[in-house]
Image (cartoon, grey):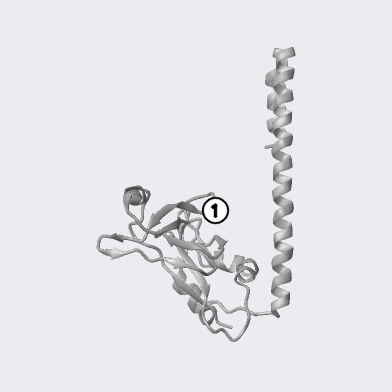
Amino acid sequence: MPIATILDYLSGNSGLTEEKIYQSITVEGQRYIVLSGSTQEENIFGAAPRYSIDGKELKTFEDKAGILVVRKGKAGSTSFIKEGKYMINDDAYILYLKAQLRYEISLKWLMIQYRDIFYEYASSSDNGTWNMTRFSENVKIDIPLYDEQIELVRKHENLERIENQLRKIRSKFELLLTKQIVASSHQCPSLYPIIFHSFFIGYG
């Protein structure tokens, strides 16, 4: 099924910079989470009210789930956004399900299952860009039963939880080992450079 018959998209707000967000602090009204393709922590760029920049009212995305697709930078990378109130700057798109689809589709399943396809429509340069037009015109997908989609999402979420737990365990282990290295260096300062170098070579 052509992806263009399944997904609609919202393009970013040009000119929605950190400076503009800061300047909007005194503007009253409902605050919207600003998402960006260039930020690392869950793509949150700040919060701003609905107002105008250079005479254009900012576009918003409200009360439905979406897929945030990075347009510039780490082009083609995706993240799932839950229902809420959002804006995006010009570094990203939000993709969302069209109304009245013939098939029941999990948006999160689509993002997980076709993650590699999103990357295929990004340029290969270090500061690449993602081509929404070519993606919409060329991508076709197969849609399994909804129960199968949800099962894939469940397995993926379980895997993510395990990976997060392993990262936390490794961080705690490295912190503990670093403390042990420091303690050992106090007892025998001449060994500190050797231990420290061996530790980071082992984890490099």
- Look at 47% across and 67% down and name the residue there: 62
Residue under pointer 1 = 42
Q: Amino acid at mark 1?
A: Glu
Callout 1: 10 Å neighbours few (<14), some, many (20+)? few
Look at the numbered disc 1 and give the secondary structure of its residue: loop
Left or right side of 181 for 111: left
Residue projecting furthest to the left: 55
Q: Identify the residue at horizontal 38%, vertical 49% (top origin).
A: 18
Q: Nearer the viewer, residue 43 or 26?
A: 26
Does 203 sit above or below residue 29?
above
Residue 15 spot, x, y in % from top left? 33, 57
Q: How many marks?
A: 1
Which sits in the foreground, 114 or 11? 11
Q: Residue furthest bottom?
A: 102
* Residue 188 falls in image quadrant: top right
* Image coords of residue 155 (percent x, y): 74, 64
Q: Is residue 121 above or below residue 176?
A: below
The answer to which of 183 and 45 lies nearer the viewer is 45
Q: Position of residue 80 (x, y in %)?
A: 57, 63
- Residue at 64% x, 80% y is 142
The quadrant where residue 146 appears: bottom right
* Quarter-of-image position of residue 118: bottom right
Indicate the quadrant containing the N terminus: top left, top right, bottom left or bottom right.
Answer: bottom right
Residue 153 % position (x, y): 69, 67
